[in-house]
Amino acid sequence: MDINSMIDMNFKQKVRDTFGATGDAWLQRLPAIVTKYADLWKINLIRTVVNLSHNFIMYATDAHNVKVILKIGIPSKSLESEIIALIAYDGNGCVKLLEYDLDDGVMLLEDAEMGMNLSELTLSGRDEEAVRIVVEIIEKLNLKNSPATVPATIAAHQNNQNSKRADVTNLASFAQVEDWLHGFKELHMHLVSEKTDGLFSVEIAERAEKEYCQLLSSSNKRVLLHGDLHHSNILWGKRGPWVAIDPKGVWGDPVFEVAAFTRNPVHDLLDLGGHNLKMLTKRRIELFSRYLSMDTNRIWSVSFAQAVLAGWWYYQDHKQACSTWNKMAEVFLAIE
């Protein structure tokens, strides 16, 4: 099998645009990495996943003809956090990590064998059902994953793994929700130094940072958050039936876990029109409060603040503003 021919040119360009010379060097090594782990883990490569971002992903089957996923990324702190988070979750609410190697940034995952992602429920008028599903996943992910329990979970996993071990000292490499505060400060500096059409007003940015700081100061519990639990990262799985994929692995208050859902799928939500979107968003906050025993004001605060932060991240990634995020932030302000 010619691995090089299976690496899409658009994917290569994305990697080069994001990582520069480091990405180009990794792309040159990628075919050899794929071949190495296909041989080591005795998997049969089938095809490449379409619409890749910055990780190379292939469908495959193992020696028992069970469907699996081979995922390879440029070794980094964020990729390491994803691997360790998957170990900690151990298949509870999340896809199961079967094999891994930290040095090469390689994972072998169970294939969720998805039929759809959670956005399809929301867009078919079943948003309350979608909320209940994500609540169940949050409870599975957060229930036993505190700073006191995660090291023991990883240590137990190490005893049963033949791949490159994840040292429990790497728990310190997990991001924290406090780290994201830097994004608000970057946004504010950008807004006061230059005008960017479609980006937020200084007033909205300052309000978002204020809400975020208040959330941090009032937090009294820390769990290992998925960190990006939006609709497209929740799949209908054969085992689950619903499972999460692509965890970031972030320490923080449980309330931070709901924000990726409350603002998504953002582009489709805006098609609902102002009144309907406000009603849906307000209802989501009420449901999360009821099911997870969280304060509605805190859910609103984290949802609004992270909608602004998401808009800033989009700008950083694409070098242009997307007015969608500004409109979503205004929706949250309208239902305050």
Image (spheres, helix red, strand yellow):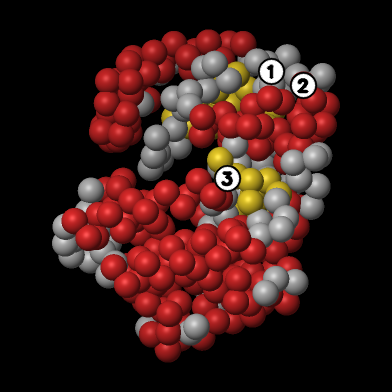
From the image, tell me which residue sits under label 2.
158
Q: Earlier in the sequence, mark 3 or mark 1?
A: 1
What label does residue 101 carry, if any? none
* Mark 2, secondary structure of its residue: helix
Q: Residues within 10 Å of mark 3 (few under 14, many from 20)?
A: some
Q: Amino acid at mark 3?
A: Gln
Q: Amino acid at mark 2?
A: Gln
Gap between marks 2 and 3 measured at Cα: 24 Å
Residue at x-position 43% and y-position 63%: 209
Mark in front: 3 vs 1: 3
Residue 202's spot in the image, x, y percent? Answer: 29, 68
Q: Is residue 123 left or right of residue 322?
A: right
Say if 125 sits above or below 71 in the image: below
- Does residue 264 appear anywhere in the picture? no
From the image, tell me which residue sits under label 3.
176
What label does residue 165 carry, if any? 1
Q: Is residue 86 left or right of residue 8?
A: right
Residue 245's spot in the image, x, y percent? Answer: 59, 45
Residue at x-position 71% and y-position 58%: 220
Residue 53's spot in the image, x, y percent? Answer: 39, 39
Q: Amino acid at mark 1?
A: Arg
Q: Quadrant of residue 30?
A: top left
